[in-house]
Amino acid sequence: MNYIGSKSRLSSWILEEVKQVVGNDLSQKIFCDIFAGTGIIGRTFKEEVKQVISNDLEHYSFVLNKNYIENHKAIQNKEKYIEELNNLALIKNGFIYQNYCMGSGSGRQYFSDENGKKIDAIRSKIKEWKDTKQINSNLYYFLLASLLESADKVANTASIYGAFLKHIKKSASKELVLYPANFIENANSHQVFNKDSNELIKEICGDILYLDPPYNHRQYSANYHILNTITHYDSFTPKGKTGLREYNRSNYCKKKKVHTSFENLIKNAKFKYIFLSYNNEGLMSEKDVKTIMEKYGIYSLKTKEYQRFKADKTENRNHKADKTYEYLHILEKEDI
């Protein structure tokens, strides 16, 4: 997915730096990705560690990680379900079409009319299969994750769902095709949560804690609200021009609260090794982070310059290169 703050370009570097500190053999380690997003880092460590604990407060993230992290055994006949969903008759009374497609009179154009109807048809069928127990939890999250990623490919937006484009762009005019969200299979079991990170940290323990909180005032709940609506598929009255639902407001996006929230997270963490990804545009400065982390053990810092890609305002997949610095703050915690 085209996701703000994605670590896909940095995942191999992060793995390398973790091994430099913890050791090359991570096979008996429990790794926690507590602000998981689309789960790129958890997926990177899934085959390296004994167990991945994945968490995010956003429901779309929970769905993606239930599939990519928690699913670890083969699902029989999953291609058959994908094929059936791809061939469903369209429906025009579904929630997405009625509220987020122009043809319904909603005034919103997040998807073409046909794709909105297809999203509704697929989502309704997945719900029906789940409610009638025709599919188990593993298959349910696999199919729902497949729908999220496939819908995102034809979204009529400039990367995020904070606004839609006035005219249907080329990629959004293509027919939605449901592609399988294939996951890594391995012998280990993994855990996925949908909780506030500062509360979950009091309930879990492990060896390696990876932190990738929001950097600035940007609220992920608002920017990806359509994905949450697809996963919940509930009934509500969308608000305003962009059709927002009620959404979470993270303390990590608030300048007056981020320092306290971050320190409480570090203080309550029952993990020996803590790695924080943050960049030079964050609400907390490099000095702020160091001051907090070094209270709790041995602190060090790694820095990497890389090409960050911003979506062009006029076209979703046209990207502009923009250099930024990624900081990897490292803590070997004492007195766990």
Image (cartoon, rainbow, N blue to C red):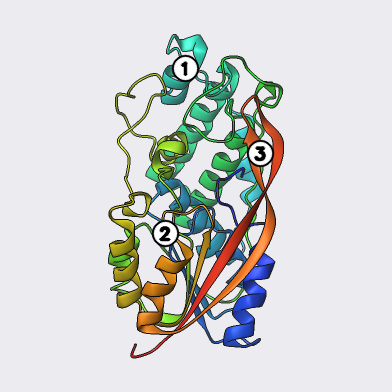
Mark 3, other Cα within 10 Å: few <14 / some 14–19 / many ≥20: some
Q: Nearer the viewer, mark 3 or mark 1?
A: 1
Q: Which quadrant does the C terminus fall into?
A: bottom left
Quarter of the image where one finds residue 293: bottom left
**Above or below, comparing residue 21 to residue 56 in the picture:** below
Give, as a three-letter code, the residue at label 3. Answer: Glu
Give, as a three-letter code, the residue at label 1. Answer: Arg
Quarter of the image where one finds residue 187: bottom right
Mark 1, other Cα within 10 Å: few <14 / some 14–19 / many ≥20: many
* Whole-number angstrom distance, CA of label 3 to CA of label 1: 29 Å
Where residue 206 sits: x, y (%)?
A: 42, 81
Query: Residue, x 34% and y 34% (percent of image)?
Result: 234
**Residue bearing mark 2:** 284
Which is more toward the observer, 288 or 245? 288
**Residue bearing mark 1:** 108
Quarter of the image where one finds residue 22: bottom right
**Residue bearing mark 3:** 83
Query: Residue, x 53% and y 63% (percent of image)?
Result: 69
* Whole-number angstrom distance, CA of label 3 to CA of label 2: 47 Å
* Whole-number angstrom distance, CA of label 1 to CA of label 2: 36 Å
Which callout, 3 or 1, points at the residue further toward the start of the chain?
A: 3
Where residue 70 sits: x, y (%)?
A: 50, 64
Where residue 61 sits: x, y (%)?
A: 47, 51
